[in-house]
């Protein structure tokens, strides 16, 4: 019997369109002999739709028309079966549109990649691919991620966090914190976004204020850290879980400016339309010495496991060429295009990568079923429920 996989993509995120590209890339790359695929599109209003039209990326040029010919659904668990139910429910007949055995989120950004969607799936007892709720939340908060990595001996740059209310209350004091702790130049980025959204470099106070106001349009908290001016950026993905993990090939993305932009990643390399990270400009494999390549790959696995990741994540590194020091920049718990091109460079086809990720999700599900989640005793049977004092007893 084939494994029924629901591929979830889209969502209430500034990276919505990138998720659609990544999600349909994955959907079209599964081994159909082993899997039955159900595409599930999450609108920017967090409504769920499925149907044949959802699987055709050409339909996303006109999303209202796409939704008109698709089926809106909601999720329900019935006797251990995960069902997609037509909404509104039919007055007569069966409203079950599909059943899924495992969910495969291919989502990017806040409100979906940060544990929100993962918590929704866990609430309905749906096995899902990728990082769990806590790991998703930690990896998507750049400040929390840095504190965890620093505590585990992984090199990261020193930073300052600012919130929008603090900045609005006293701009000079907020800038003074940055200048006193780090100095210039600095790089400013939203705490919980990916895809290089909302990022700017500042070389003086005027530039800092401009960059902060820009970053605050994407979220209430920002991260400010030292900008490495003689910089090389290297990316490496990791596949596995807490028990066993392996690193991919390393790449060096090609930037058109001081920092790798959203356009560098998703627009500049595409011809006739974006195809996600697959067409971004890069040097693959990166031109590294064997020693430096191995250092980065080992640090990637260390980062992945310190953050308790699962499935595939991509770790983005910075090399300060003045000192040859390597730092972890950030981790992408659900990377664009699931970083399949980094695995193809080592001879692992995309279909095999997807198969490994589903296997890891089912392994976690088997392990969690053996965990104690409730007690057989029911204190409510003997408790005095007549008042709050009785409940305490």
Image (spheres, rainbow, N blue to C red):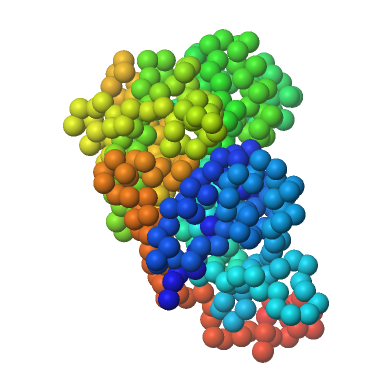
Q: Residue 137: image x %, image y %? A: 54, 48
Q: Residue at x 45, y 74 (%)?
A: 369
Q: Residue 144: image x %, image y %? A: 51, 41
Q: Residue 87: image x %, image y %? A: 75, 66
Of 30 and 192, nearer the camera is 30
Look at the image and tell me in which quarter the N terminus lies.
bottom left
Classify 143 as above or below 2.
above
Q: Residue pushed farthest left? A: 290
Number of residue marks: 0
Quarter of the view holding residue 366: bottom left
Q: Is residue 99 visible to the viewer in this orientation of the structure?
A: yes
Q: Is residue 4 left or right of residue 11?
A: left
Q: Is residue 131 left or right of residue 107?
A: left
Q: Residue at x 41, y 19 (%)?
A: 228
Of 334 and 21, nearer the camera is 21
Of 193 and 221, nearer the camera is 193
Of 138 and 75, nearer the camera is 75
Q: Residue at x 40, y 23 (%)?
A: 254
Look at the image and tell me in which quarter the C terminus lies.
bottom right
Q: Residue at x 54, y 43 (%)?
A: 21
Q: Residue 52: image x %, image y %? A: 61, 59
Quarter of the view holding residue 208: top right
Q: Residue pushed farthest bottom? A: 382
Classify 76 as above or below 327.
below
Classify 338 as above or below 77.
above
Quarter of the view holding residue 72: bottom right
Q: Is residue 196 visible to the viewer in this orientation of the structure?
A: no
């Amino acid at each position: 019997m084939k494994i029924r996989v629901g591929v979830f993509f889209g969502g209430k995120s500034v990276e919505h369109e990138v998720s659609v590209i990544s999600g349909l890339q994955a959907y079209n790359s599964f081994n159909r002999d082993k899997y039955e695929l159900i595409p599930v599109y999450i609108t920017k209003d967090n409504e769920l739709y499925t149907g044949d039209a959802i699987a055709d990326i050409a339909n996303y040029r006109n999303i209202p028309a796409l939704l008109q010919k698709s089926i809106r659904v909601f999720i329900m668990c019935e006797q251990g079966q995960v069902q997609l139910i037509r909404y509104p429910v039919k007055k007569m007949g069966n409203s079950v549109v599909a059943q899924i055995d495992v969910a495969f989120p291919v989502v990017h950004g806040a409100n979906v990649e940060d544990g929100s969607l993962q918590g929704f799936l866990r609430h309905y007892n749906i096995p899902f691919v990728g990082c769990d709720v806590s790991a998703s939340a930690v990896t998507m908060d750049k400040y929390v991620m840095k504190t965890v990595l620093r505590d585990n001996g992984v090199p990261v740059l020193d930073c300052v966090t600012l919130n929008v209310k603090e900045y609005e209350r006293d701009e000079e004091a907020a800038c003074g914190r940055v200048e006193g702790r780090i100095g210039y130049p600095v790089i400013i980025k939203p705490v919980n976004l990916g895809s290089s959204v909302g990022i700017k470099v500042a070389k003086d106070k005027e530039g800092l204020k401009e960059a902060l106001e820009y970053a605050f349009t994407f979220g209430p908290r920002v991260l400010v850290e030292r900008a490495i001016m003689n910089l090389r950026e290297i990316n490496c993905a990791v596949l596995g879980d807490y028990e066993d993990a392996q690193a991919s090939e390393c790449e060096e993305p090609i930037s058109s400016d001081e920092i790798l932009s959203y356009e560098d990643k998703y627009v500049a390399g595409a011809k006739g339309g974006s195809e996600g990270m697959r067409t971004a400009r890069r040097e693959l494999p990166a031109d590294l010495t064997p020693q430096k390549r191995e250092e980065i790959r080992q640090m990637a696995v260390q980062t992945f496991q310190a953050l308790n990741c699962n499935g595939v994540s991509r770790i983005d590194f910075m090399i300060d060429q003045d000192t040859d020091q390597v730092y972890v920049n950030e981790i992408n718990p659900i990377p664009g295009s699931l970083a399949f091109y980094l695995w193809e460079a080592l001879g692992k086809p995309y279909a095999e990568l997807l198969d490994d990720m589903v296997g890891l999700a089912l392994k976690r599900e088997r392990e969690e079923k053996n965990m104690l989640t409730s007690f057989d005793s029911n204190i409510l049977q003997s408790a005095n429920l007549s008042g709050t004092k009785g409940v305490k007893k």
